[in-house]
Amino acid sequence: MPIFVQFKRNFNLIMLGQKVKLLKIALRTYSKKLAGNFYVTTPIFYVNGAPHIGHLYSACLADAISRYQRLLCLENSGITRLSTGTDEHGTKIDRAASASKAPVMDYCTKMSHLFAEVFREASVQHCDFIRTTEQRHEKAVHHFWNTLFERDTIYLNQYNGWYCVADETFITNNQLRLDEQSGARYSLESGHSVEWTEEENYMFRLSKFQADILYWLQQGNRVRPVKFEKILMDMLNEPLLDISISRPINRVSWALPVPNDPTQTIYVWFDALVNYLTSVGYPDGKYTEFWAPNVQVIGKDILKFHGIYWPAFLIAAGMEPPRQLYVHSHWTVDGQKMSKSKNNVIDPTIAAKTYTMEGLRYFLLREGTAHSDANYCSVKAMRILNAELADTLGNLLSRVCSKALNPRQVYPRFHTAQLREILKTNNGRQLRDVLQQFEAKCTQHFNDGNFYMGADLIMSTLHAANRFLEFSRPWELKLKISDVDIDKRLTLPMPQCDENCLKLETIIAMTMDTLRVCGIALQPLVPSLSTLLLDKLRVPYDQRKWRNLNHHFVQVAEGALEPPLEVCLNRTHLILFRRLTPKEDDHVEPKLAKMKEPEKCKKSKRKTKNVVS
């Protein structure tokens, strides 16, 4: 009988026997919250090496998700929480500390601070940076262990199998590759060598929860992109075996001790996964305010641990598994796998000296795709940042804020008659059509976690605004307006103003409005740069929410919104993003401009009621 057919029969029997149990689990743990707090996590990062762009990408991706969630401001929404941190136990850490000739705890502290500093510089707005060497985490891990032990899902047993020291995990026979010449065996997944090990371990009854894991996966949108859900389903096509969750202390000493057994230490992955509970206050009662995680961002290399082991541990403890795993692929460098042996690991701190940290963050989110590996190329990074942030975005802002075109330095109001006339032209209609579709398309991309598609949409919208400005030829209108007309514009009632002056102001206002909309949408991607942009336009903080994407000149033209009042621009000279130079010896970090406190203006605020619904 084929293995799959035999497994399917056995699995059907399991499903039948657990039908009542699954229904109870469904009622107890798999309910959806329509509103409430929102919890996002990154994986915690292993401190056996310094941070690289793969680590930063994970953190920026999770940060973009949490920032977007805050912008949504849904009705009855609660607190959005982002947690990150460092994983500091295991043999590899112990060896790395020895190699650096430092006490292991000192080594962990130093490396953890490197991660924290990189994330701070990259504007990763986390609520908690957890370290697995903290006392609160040891308390949480021991409580979780005891819960599983009391539920009879942990037992002591003699264990033997192939163990990978580099990956700190046991490997099954079908996960091995045999070298015919040397007779050595290697992990198919990582390529690291394995060794036969026989020892006494504590085991977790993973086999008992196969049906539960499958049920969890079948609830829809549990794992995204869908290709990674299929990978998990393939794993579940084979019977799950019980797994070892402890190691003898004489083999792995730098780890948390097993409760009530000084001869064993806790498996590093069991320890690491519990960090998501520790971060929200487990085991104290208030942790339930944020449980279960809404989105857990992970790399594809740790899918098995988060998609099989983690939900099984939680179900065994009577807790709800994560609502969604967002899995991303890896980064190559110039088409090659990033590795220490190839000396091509990209240090974010060094890269930021060329691109700025904000520029690096934008490039990673712009080029990174969850479904397939992305490629880091310095030439491409510089080209994208110059073309999109410096030219498309920065130059457009500079043009409409220039004293030559906008001598009064204002964000003008829309003049309804002129606005409607402009929207009758092909030039005006094209910008209108782009802006009308913007909110729905951008929301879809960001909801799916496809920030690279959102960035593409934002840039295409800015291109449309640049074309609109170019074809509108505002500088020709400006030549028709005398300085006297500009002075009169400050005192005359609207009907008495020069037609060219009103049209010019409306063109500038339409362009600035597109910049405002794109600036709001850019906040999850480049928070510092988008703040500079919105500050320059003097957009009030309460009008920088996602709902404000739909409050634009199209609604003014249709009569759905009153034209907002004129606003004085922030008069500080601003170069939003300086063009980067490809000089190899240039180690000076291009700085994002700092803006001073806005100057006072008689009409310094838009009427909130005109813009916010």
Image (cartoon, rainbow, N blue to C red):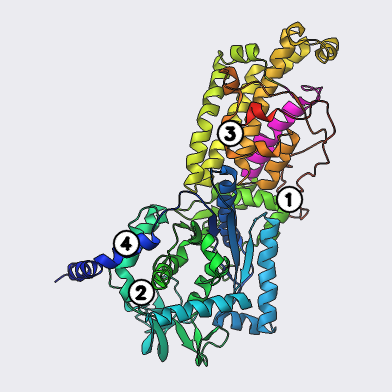
State the predominant SS element of the stretch in magenta.
Answer: helix
Q: Which residue is drawn at the image coordinates 76% and 15% (left, top)?
A: 478
Between the C-alphas of marks 3 and 2, the distance is 49 Å
In the depicted structure, whether residue 429 falls above or below residue 212: above
Say which residue label 2 marks: 175
**Could you tell me if the residues under marks 1 and 3 are in contact, i.e. CB atoms within 8 Å?**
no
Between the C-alphas of marks 1 and 2, the distance is 46 Å
Under mark 3, the amino acid is Leu
Say which residue label 1 marks: 583
Residue 403 x %, y %: 81, 25
Q: Secondary structure at mark 3?
A: helix
Under mark 1, the amino acid is Lys
Say which residue label 3 marks: 549
10 Å crowding of disc 1: few (<14), some (14-19), many (20+): few
Under mark 4, the amino acid is Tyr
The residue mark sitting in front, 1 or 2, is: 2
Say which residue label 4 marks: 215
Residue 537 x %, y %: 73, 33
Q: Secondary structure at mark 4?
A: helix
Q: Earlier in the sequence, mark 1 or mark 2?
A: 2
Under mark 2, the amino acid is Gln
Which range is magenta?
383-412
Between the C-alphas of marks 4 and 3, the distance is 38 Å
Asked if the magenta segment contains residue 249, the reply would be: no
Q: Secondary structure at mark 1?
A: loop
